[in-house]
Amino acid sequence: MKYKILSIAFLSIFTSFNLSAEGEWKEIPNEYWSCYAETPRFAMSPGGKYLAITRSPKSNVCDIEPDKEKRVEDETYHSSLTFINLDTMESRLISDGTPGKGIDYMRWMSDDRYLFWPSTKKTGSNANGYGKVFAVNVDGSQRADMSKNNKFGQMGMQSTRITNRLAGEPKNALGRSNIRRAMVSDYVKVNLYTGKTNKIANGFNPKDAKKHRVNNELIDKDGYPQAIWVDEGIDRVIYEYSKDSGLWNEHVRFKCHEPFFYPLSIIEDTGEWLVTGSKFSSEGRLVEENDTNAIYLYNPQTREFGEKMYQDARYDIGGYTGACRNATGGASIDSDTRKLNSINWISHKPERIVFDEKLKQLYASLEATFPEEWVSIVTSDTEKTKMVFRVSSSTNPGDYYYYDTLAGKLIPLFSNSPWIDRDLMSPKIPFTYKARDGLEIPAYLTLTKKKTKHKYMIMLPHGGPNVKQSVGFDHWVQFLSNKGYNVIQMDYRGSTGLGTNHYVSGNMQWGKKMQDDISDAVFWAIDNGYADADRVCIAGASYGGYATMAGLTFTPELYRCGINAVGVVNQKSILEEFSTKAGMMNNWTDEAALEWGDLSNEEGQQYVKDISPVLFVDNIIAPVLVLQGTNDRIVPPEHARELIKELKRKNKTYMSMFQAKEGHCVKCGGEQASLEYFDIQEEFLKKYLEN
């Protein structure tokens, strides 16, 4: 299909769109990696009459806020709202975002009525209007307070939140409310003109509010729940709702690291569930065990599975990895019809299986137009004839377009970080190598475009550790590549999204086989000519910071230097801190005991001693850079301070930087802090990797 690439008047509300010139290599200033990059929120009305745009009034340019106390410019915290009439292409400013007038978020309820959340504070990181929600017509009439019954109780905010439009009932919407009971969110119907609620189903009441977490739910088009997924320690339980009794009953129970299935969506026409995982008989016997999660249809009434619909041999398709940790992806559900649009997951790129034929053709057309990019629809009308979509990749932080399928109009809207020249970025190249025990490790190689005297290499293991390596644009990777260094990121064992075996193989392997996987990436890079053996540095944040210190202490001969950002160095401390910080509906202590170390027995206590880098500082022979935010609540600054104390005591070469206003980050919320982090890394690598 041919598109008309247009530039029209309403685009003046945006400041710039990236139109980069081609080029091989040009040094990029560190300010460009450090600047705050805004992403507007786009929302299409159901009938496609209006496009709403919520964004900061700040110009979309790179200018570092010099005041570290402020972190970013005051305007960044403000939020304006503009409506575009898509028939006439005329824009109307609803709010200019000035203090006291800002609108932090909006949501369409119909073509004529919308919800908005006001910003009530003047400036600062708490600028959002907390708890207040209003409904109003597009012309400004019939404004109603949807939050008038909200209240603060002993357990925090008790409120009604609107979750979805209600098809066929434009005056009402679906929502959840914990006003009746603080720890239970009932399913309600909400009148959009009065705010009055009507309970349609009882919310789930966890047996232990501190340790049990509700992580997913299946809701039909009428707002009734069918099932929820609950974490109970290391048990994973599906509860099913009975409309007749109003009670939640246990449907099936699994344990971490054992075969399971997970409900992704309801098939409205048949009442079946689309599930991911392994296949069981109606009596609960395991019939088909899958290492990577596979897709099936499942009848919850008869407990019978259909034939396997699809399985990716290498990657999990949504749900949980090993029944325990979140896998990437899931089901995309139409918010109005509740019909299944697609199933999405991440391999070395975003993947999808599209069920809606119209949507399938649409994606095929857009992907043909942007063959080197990853396309995702951000918002659309109900008929999917008008939409805003995003294109991105490992070299593109994101560009947004408006597309009218009937008129054939394709209009550039907004570029994330337009100061970053996409043509100067280096793509992530997926590859696989074998660890010494034969386990296949997926990884990404980013090659510098700069001509250098040596083949420098940065090993950059991800944090987590029980997550999957991001495949998208990465400021840290591009910074390193632009400075002249090749970069390898690997999904070492223990990473999720790659099947149960890959994940479970990392249990109790911090500093051991998990570290071997990183070492084996070093050998692969040297053997394949991407790194000089004496020019390899290791860097990482969080668990990646731990892996840096484990590399410098347990395999010191491999590395010329190391950068430890907000990294764990004392395993006993992190496990104790993790347990004490487990709070209401946020408890992972049982999983951590399986994966990271168990302090309740002598074997576990010895393990954490054996793998804690701070106890082996004597082994370090390479310079180390320590980066730490003093507001870090995940890996407290005591880890960095304990490490630096030992480095000093042992007369080791090191540099360090603490950021007083920052937390668990390398590219942080504060622009000046981020810039200082990038600057000191550049100084450190020039001094110790290049010289």
Image: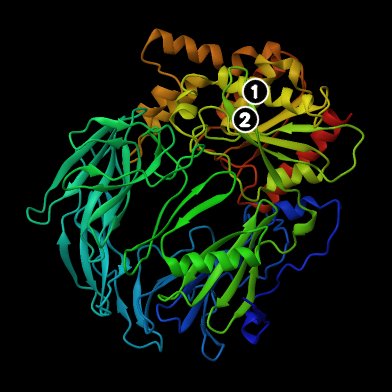
Q: Is residue 120 visible?
A: no
Asked whether 40 or 141 is in front, the reply is: 40
- Name the residue: 61% across, 18% down: 613
Position of residue 358 relative to residue 243, above or below, is below
Furthest toward the bottom, the residue is 88
For label 1, the SS is helix
Point out which mark residue 545 bears.
2
Image quarter hosting the C terminus = top right
147 displayed left or right of 661:
left
Point out which mark residue 219 bears.
none
- Residues under labels 1 and 2: Cα distance? 6 Å
Say which quarter of the image contains residue 171.
bottom left
431 displayed left or right of 440:
right
Which residue in the protein does label 1 denote? 549
Question: Badge 1 local density, few (<14 within 10 Å), some, or many (20+)?
Answer: many
Position of residue 262 relative to residue 588, above or below, is below
Furthest toward the left, the residue is 245
Furthest toward the right, the residue is 453
Say which quarter of the image contains residue 611.
top right
Q: Is residue 4 visible?
A: yes
- The image shows residue 490 at horizontal and vertical percentages of 62, 33
Asked whether 141 or 18 is in front, the reply is: 18
Q: Are marks 1 and 2 in contact (CB under 8 Å)?
A: yes
Mark 2 residue type: Gly
